[in-house]
Image (cartoon, rainbow, N blue to C red):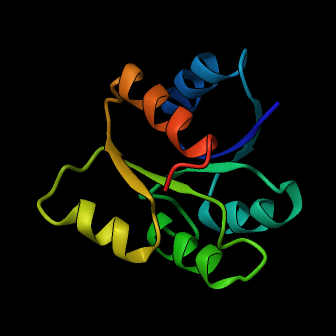
Amino acid sequence: MKKILIVEDVEFNLDLLVQLLEDDYELAIARDGSQGVEMATTENPDLILMDMSLPVLDGWEATRTIKADARLKHIPVIGLSAHAMSGDRQKALECGCKDYLTKPLDEDLLMEKLDFFLEGGQ
């Protein structure tokens, strides 16, 4: 079973993601960016869902840190944000995210992206 690390601090969003994914994936949960970076190392996930607005270390910097680590840079990161500001998608791709989805999440699109990246899509 593929493992997904969810880095999310908002309980409602986390609950939604867990409900969507728990039957098909092994899940690891981090509540802030610093914990997300640490768990990326210890949990060895197949994919990371990274909220970009996080306490301690934001998702932008957490993703940069993960991508700078030779042991972790291969892990696809999908950035998640409630902010649909112009330029945020490009900023997410520049910091190392493979894709960027806005909240509220389109569940079908999320599942499509997970299938793509977990099957080796680039």
| Residue drawn at (30%, 44%) of the image | 82
Residue 22 placement (x, y as % from top left): 71, 20
Q: Quadrant of residue 119?
A: top right
| Total tally of numbered discs in the picture | 0
Foreground pick, 11 / 47: 47
Left or right of 80 on screen, residue 74: right
Task: Give the residue drawn at x 82%, y 67%.
Answer: 41
Displayed quadrant of residue 112: top left
Q: Nearer the viewer, residue 99 or 9?
A: 99
State which quarter of the image contains the N terminus.
top right
Where 50 falls versus 35 (above or below)?
Answer: above
In the image, 102 versus 11, the foreground residue is: 102
Instruction: Answer with the quarter of the image where residue 93 lies.
Output: bottom left
Q: State the residue in front, 69 or 36.
A: 69
Q: Position of residue 99 (x, y in %)?
A: 39, 53
* Outermost right residue: 42
Residue appearing at x 75%, y 61% in the figure: 40
Residue 29 lies, in percent from the top left, at 72, 43
Q: Is residue 114 above or below residue 42?
A: above
Relative to 67, residue 32 above or below: above
Give residue 28's position: percent from left, percent from top: 77, 42
Q: Is residue 109 left or right of residue 96?
A: left
69 left or right of 79 in image = right
